[in-house]
Image (cartoon, grey):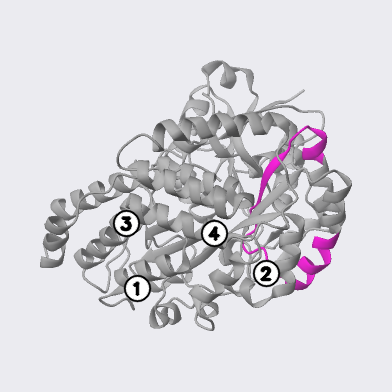
Amino acid sequence: MTRALLVYPEFRSPSFWNYREACRILDADYPTAPLGLCTIAALLPADWDIRLIDKNVEQLADSDLDWADIVLTGGMMSQQQDCFEIIERATARRKRVVVGGPDATSSPHHYSRATHLVLDEGELTLPVFLDDLKNGCAKSIYRDQRKADVRTSPTPRFDLLQFDCYTHMCVQWSRGCPFNCEFCDIIELFGRVPRVKSIEQNLRELQRLYDLGYRGHIDVVDDNFIGNKKLVKEFLPHLKRWQEERGWPFEFSTEATINLADDPVVMGLMRDVGFFAVFVGIESPDKTTLIGMQKLQNTRRSIVESIRKIYTYGMFVNAGFILGFDDERDGVARGIIECVEEGGMPVNMVGQLFALPMTQLTRRLASEGRLHKDFDVSPVGDDQCTAGLNFETSRPRAEILADYMQVIETVFSAGKYFDRVLKTTLMLDSSERRFRPKLRKQFKELKGLWRMILKLGIPAETRPHFWRVLIQGVMKNPRSIRYAGSLMALYLHFGPFAKYVVSRTRETIDKENLVPSKVALLGSSRGIINIKLPSV
């Protein structure tokens, strides 16, 4: 029997999404589990002995490596440095090391120390590797740039997970996105024609989680959930019936483009099956900038009105913004701040533009001679929030960093953040929500509330804001108070993280001797905000 050890590298860099402090109030260690490795595990031979270690929630011991005959790992660019260390530790013990995933697919030259690179989509390349391995003729690299038929993808090995380590589980129903954003690597890795799993397949995955005893939040990690609206409309009524038959065990979140707001039928179906949150990439409120980045879908509607419309269907919006595009002008910071405040979006992932491998943006910058050396090496200890702009910018770098600090300091000040949480709580229509936490989860949430009171309801910086949201939320929209609590808990991460981001950005300005008057004015007129974040 072959003993296979699957190791998920740690996300070491501080990030908007690594909200461990928020997870801890619910006795969890990390937001979500490694769905990709669970799917790879399901593609391995049935007679293999398989273990999975997620380094975000547990340690990788030498004894784990000694047990294994083969080690499989891989991840995203922000996991790159830890993945390198896993490879080194395993090869030092003369283990066969197999690496795949999006970063190795995009930058295979960084992973030459691995025994085998099994790249692109695992449904295509992994079976070929396994056949060669069985026959004693495994090659060093496997590639297949076709797109897999996701209807053949197996049910992930959710049984390898420890559910209590995470705040939520995740599933993937489709791959790909029909749009053409210049900076995005999704359309390069997975294509612009969304591929969708069958209805039976989707329900089988949910049933597996249900049979294993999981109840609660599931994130649908599709690149764009509404990439194929026709199939979404076909699937959601079946999901509603499945939920009804089992007493509404799950509630959902996902990622979608802003044109979701154009389709009341889809929004109504999503509300009816229990979707409560959606991440939307806004990037910039400026039309010229959006046209330059080829995100045309955001130019054909009012962003703020679209966001408010989504709220009326019981879903709040988590938004993404990016600074550093070529077409940006002075005033971009003010525009982002106004968009955030008018839209009432508490959670905003604001990052510096990072040229990812295998994107139209990177190819253009390379042709213009503007890419930095080693642009595709993940900076140690940083992500795009503190180490973006890995190219020569068209606008002065100092101005971009000054605008970036202005946005972070403003939108993540305690008063502004909790104001938006209250606005969200009052706007959010949860009247149709049927999901109810089971007693065990209710007990965890009550413990979490008590911990929030200690961490947010007592300190002077957050005390008045916390109690204002809690009291008004209970009085005016009690059905949405669970989500208000989740959003407030996220401040346990956003507060300190925003402070960290501003501090690191100032260090960059000092290190590079970037001292325009705009930065100096910011430094003298604004304090450094203290902010933190948990998971919803």
Give the percent coordinates (x, y) of residue 459: 33, 35
Judged by depth in the image, the label closer to the viewer, 1 or 2, is 1
Q: In the image, which residues are magenta?
A: 208-237
For the view shown, which residue lies furthest in the top direction?
63
Q: Which mark is residue 426?
A: 4
Q: Residues within 10 Å of mark 3 (few under 14, many from 20)?
A: many
Of badges 3 and 4, nearer the viewer stands 4
Q: Quadrant of the N terminus?
A: top right
Say which element carries label 4. helix
Q: Give percent across and percent down for residue 192.
A: 64, 71
**Along the viewing direction, whichever of 485 and 132 lies nearer the viewer:** 485
Q: Quadrant of residue 376?
A: bottom left
Rounded to the nearest angstrom, the CA distance separating label 1 from label 3 is 13 Å
Element at label 3: helix
> Earlier along the polypeptide chain: callout 3 or callout 4?
3
Residue under label 1, please give it: 335
Residue at the spot of label 3: 408
Q: CA distance from mark 1 to mark 2?
A: 28 Å
Q: Is residue 305 visible?
A: yes
The residue carrying pointer 1 sits among few (fewer than 14), some (14 to 19) or many (20 or more) residues within 10 Å by Cα, namely some
- First of labels 1, 4 by sequence position: 1
| Residue at 76% over, 60% down | 272
Asked which secondary structure carries label 1, the reply is helix
Q: Which residue is mark 2?
A: 227
Which is more N-terminal, label 3 or label 2? 2
